[in-house]
Amino acid sequence: MDTPPPVLPVLVCLRLLLAVLPLPGQHLLKHDNQLSSPLTSYLRLNEGLWLLDNGIDPYMGGAFHHSPLLLSLFSTIVPPLPLIWAVSDAVGAWALLRIWRARQGLSPHKGTRSNAENLIVSVYLLNPYLLLPSLALSTSTFENTLALLALMFASEGKPSPALLAIAFTVHLAPSFILLLLPILMLLVASPASRLASSRPFHGSLKRIPFFFGKFILYWLVLVGAACTMTGGSWSWVMGSWGASLTLPDLTPNPGLWWYFFTEMFDHFRPFFLMVFSVHLVIYILPICIKFQHDPLYAAFLLVGVLGTFKAYLTLADPGLFLSMISLFPEVHGYLRHPIITTLLHLHAALLLPLQHVLWVSEGRGNANFYYAASLVMGMAGGAGLVDACWAGMRIAIGDAKAEAEEKVEGEKGKVVQWEVVQE
Amino acid sequence: MRRVSVWVGLAYLLTPSLALYQGENYKEDLRIQPLRDGRVSTTFSFVTVLEGAVPRNPTALGQPDESQHYALFPLTLGQILREYAITELHLTLNAGKWNYDNWGHPHEAGVGTGAELWAWMGASDVTTVDERWSGLRNALSGLFCASLGSLDSRRTSSPTVAFPLSGSTPPFAPHELRHASLPSENVCTENLTPFLKLLPCKSHAGLAALLNPQKVFDADWHGMGVHVIWKEGTGVELKLTLQTVFNPVRTSAGKRRDWSLQSLFDRSIERSCPVASSSSVTVILPEEKNHQITPQLPAHVDGLAIYDLSSSSNLTIPSNIAMYWPSEHSFQYPLPPLLPLTPLSVKRTIHGTTQTRGVLYVSVTNNSPHEISAGYLEMMPALLTLWMHTLKVEINSQIRSDLLSALNYHPPSPQSNGRLSPSMLQAILTIPAKSTLKISMEVNKAFLKYTEHPPDAMRGWDLPGAVFFPLPQSTDTISSSYDWERIYTPTLLVDLPTPDFSMPYNVIILSCTLMTLIFGSIFNLLTRKWVVVEIPE
């Protein structure tokens, strides 16, 4: 059957144990603004379930922004237990593993006994950016898992499950629409690594509109299901999807939107909301065109864009980007400043909770401290994204030094140094 | 002949011609009650009745109104009531915290701190209730020089069970309630002056002559109220009330609780109001008999000393009513434990040291020997998000969910002006005898936009008090009076996290710079050509 790498069962058991055992600081994690946002908070999920139980429209006030699908899942099928988050983490790690196997051209069920597979699974399950929000019971875990499942099915060339998974993801978090085009490209091309040998898009473009139509069909079915669950009203659209677009709740988070729109005057608010939303969308076409030879890498870069510029950012979003780096070991040698990225992330991850406590709990700091830490977080995300973009293209050029040596072999043996730059 | 006609004319002018005041009736009353902690509570009530009058039908608002002629009823307020077709109106402006345990129930139940305005209006197609409510607020704020215009949709809700129609319901149109309160509103002389202008005799004659702003606003608690009620047999009744709680122990030299009208108000009643059909001062005598009251009355009825001041009485107007305790050297506060004077004692606090979240605790103590069922109303502005799934009811740290029933919760709903209405929580609590019930729920404090903060943002926001009200009896028994009235909890001050107010430009610059840097770097990378360049030696 499925031969997992030896580390996977161990880590999954550990994660299940963490979900079941009562840890000392676990109830504090649920309230932390870095680990969950108003769109993903466990507290608001429970509030929505209570409102639904008592016959009140959950989307009427400003408290509940989750999707109706989550409401129906947790009210009818299974209560919101921490075990579900642990299972979701395990499924996400397994999906990442299968993406790796598809990319390497291996059979999905039988991997090699290399350390790469151990590394990939550990990087997903032990990443603090992903583990802590999962322990805080933030629903961003489900969003990440569904996105990875969509990429997994697309890499293995299964259109229907992939389109269904991405429809679910887009329904839960509309900003994942950025991943739609890479997934459509993946479905008609192969996920194998083509970074080093770029060529124009070789899949059949004719099938893409057909897959897009199928996605729209699945998405409409989900919209209909959500409408049925909320009793035929459309208030959930404004409450759950509209929250990412209109930013009703200005709770601080590690992202760039909240302080900008706190300090913005009402007159300019709609314009800048539109600018910030369009800014997210504007990355899709250029990245997909430039990386048309490797749609999986394009999806990875777009996950990085989301992890820096999303509306209600939590640590789980850059966490997905950082964990997916393990899928592309070929670019690791070409990263220009991995140390700077790491240090910026470390800097931000340590400063964010500290400045939050100083501002809000102790009253000794003010909002600017936390804002500065969120700017560092933005820089860390930007540094990682820019570096990954550079490395993904630089690998196609190859090693200039070797060419130079060959070229001067016939001459006096003068060594000429060459370097690859952009102009 | 001409001199006789002049004398007849003068005599005609001097005698009060009752024909002019037909259909209107004015009564004034002052109740003085010494309290057990040495304070003195005084309640002025000025009642003007428009006999046979009916509130305006709101469906007829498009047509011109029939002309109204008032002699005693204030024209300004009458015009407002007709303009917006108000059936019942209650406005109170109070300052201070009413101490129910030591002072008992007030004579007028509306003692919530700050401004509280509620009105019952009939529904109409011509103008909506909300439009008339907005017009009413602005008209009253102009009339009373109070900032009632800020009682907009952020503070307006509709708690029909706690604030039912006190009078009769007119047959036309279903009626709707609008209730709003602003705890941070201050009361001062500029509110008292227009209040006095609504009286027939203004502040020149009658009991209103006692109202000295210097003394009234120095009192420990003071509040004024305007109540307009329609009673079917009687007509439209306007009741203007002013309640104060003075502290003679604080203001007297020798820490004595002796009081007199001169010492309390620094004024005396010179003349009685000629148009008042009855004008009296009632002193509620304390139970211990070690006091003396001057002027002496022949008989005290039911522990009350009633002084009739109307012009038709034979007695001369007492120049000063005084009560003193000759055997006391200085006032000694009664030692605890003191039995509270009301059957329910309430307390409300927010626990928590952070500016993001806290826990709201409401504790109700039943001082009476039998079980009490009370209604609980919480109208919380959207600044505080109540997490209803964490609502707990406990007695002595033991969870008792059975004591809370009929829970009705309206979350904040977005209004037309983009703001959120308050969240309204109503429940019925059953408090066992001689026990303390604690309700607790977690709350989240909101992060407001830069423009939503007031100029003194660091002060915080006032939250209106919760209201405990007796439940309306389901049977139509004649006695609709309860042994207790509405109780207001004290207001709360909540501290919200503030952004840095000096930073709008800087934030926009910095955030946009970061986004532009990353955007520019990525697009540079994506669009530039790769070349291999020789490094010169």
Image (cartoon, rainbow, N blue to C red):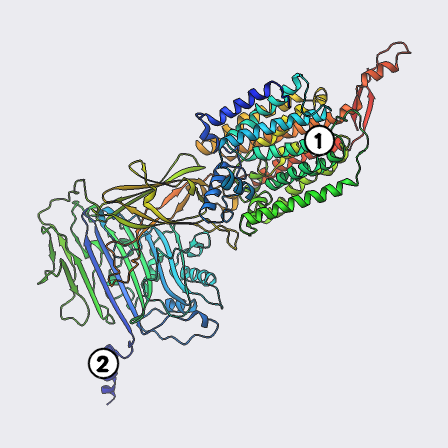
Tell which of B216 and A14 is nearer to you.
A14
Residue A103 found in image quarter? top right
Residue count near mark 1 (Cα–Cα under 10 Å), binned few <14, some 14–19, many ≥20? many
Q: What whole-number distance in Å separates the C-alpha atoms at marks 2 and 1?
A: 108 Å
Vertical placement of residue B302 versus B24, above or below:
above
Given the current orientation, which residue lies at the most extreme front position? Answer: A1
Q: Quadrant of the C terminus of chain B?
A: top right
Tell me, for residue B11, which label it has, or none. 2
Q: Secondary structure at mark 1?
A: helix
Which x, y percent locates residue B314?
A: 13, 71
Quadrant location, the N terminus of chain B: bottom left
**Amino acid under disc 1:** Ser
Q: Which mark is residue B390?
A: none
Work out whether disc 2 and disc 1 sit on a shared chain.
Answer: no
User: What is the secondary structure assignment of the residue under circle 2?
Assistant: helix
Q: Nearer the viewer, residue A347 or A389?
A: A389
The subunit carrying tag 1 is A
Determine the image quadrant of residue A261. top right
Q: Identify whether A12 is placed above or below A219.
A: above
Q: Is residue B223 above or below residue B337?
A: below
Q: Is residue B528 left or right of residue B9?
A: right
Q: Looking at this view, name the residue that lies furthest to the top.
A: A412
Chain bearing tag 2 is: B
* Residue on which the image places disc 1: A155
Residue B183 % position (x, y) = 37, 50
Left or right for B54, reference B292: right
Instruction: Residue A150 in the image: state x and y as whole percent.
Output: 66, 34
Three-letter amino acid code at the position of disc 2 = Ala
